[in-house]
Image (spheres, rainbow, N blue to C red):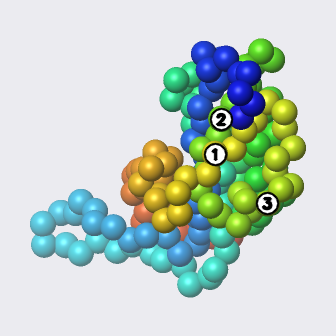
Amino acid sequence: MPADIDLSKVDVWFQDESRVGQQGSIIRMWAEKGTRPRATRRQQFKYGYIFGAVCPAKDKALDLMLPVANTAGMVEHLRLISHATAKDRQTLVIIDRAGWHMTKAIHCFNNVTLLPLPPYSPELNPVEQLWQQIKQRFLSNTAFQDYDDII
């Protein structure tokens, strides 16, 4: 981030991706005493990736669902974040060190600066907790038919 930036005009975003697929998680569920509830699980391997970013100070969130997680997807997600940033503001995006986060191709927006977390430290990114909550509350015990159903 340039040294002449007014820090009061900086928005901090946290960004991460998560894979969602046909082989979801099976977790405990409520059932009548003496019964065994059944949860279906697919054997296929179709997945989608959720690119998500949150800005707690502005109470904003952006997401993008894509078939693969790669540099092109990351650039598109950063484009959404860049467009969500006001003209007179700068955005600092906290990212992990995934391969598609560390390429020079994603440094293409003047109002977006990337700050990678230290290696092997996912606990520093609050979006990791968001993925855990979404998967446990909404996506577990769900059997998706195909890619369109995942989306």
Q: CA distance from mark 2 to mark 1?
A: 7 Å
User: Closer to the N terminus: mark 1 or mark 3?
Assistant: 3
Report the amino acid beneath label 3.
Thr
Among the two numbered marks 3 and 2 on one chain, the one whose residue lies closer to the N terminus: 2
Of the numbered discs 2 and 1, the one sitting upstream in the chain is 2
On residue 92, the disc is 2
The answer to which image quadrant residue 93 occupies is top right
From the top left corner, tell me how far across and down residue 89 is, in percent. Answer: 73, 19
Mark 3 falls on what kind of element?
Answer: loop
| Residue 103 marker | 3
Residue type indicated by callout 1: Leu
* On-image quarter of the N terminus: top right
Q: Which mark is residue 62?
A: none
Task: Report the residue marked by disc 1.
Answer: 115
Viewer-proximal residue among 135 and 11: 11
Which structural element holds mark 2?
strand
Q: Residue at x 22, y 63 (%)?
A: 31
Q: Position of residue 53 (x, y in %)?
A: 61, 41
Q: Is residue 138 visible?
A: no
Q: Secondary structure at mark 1?
A: strand
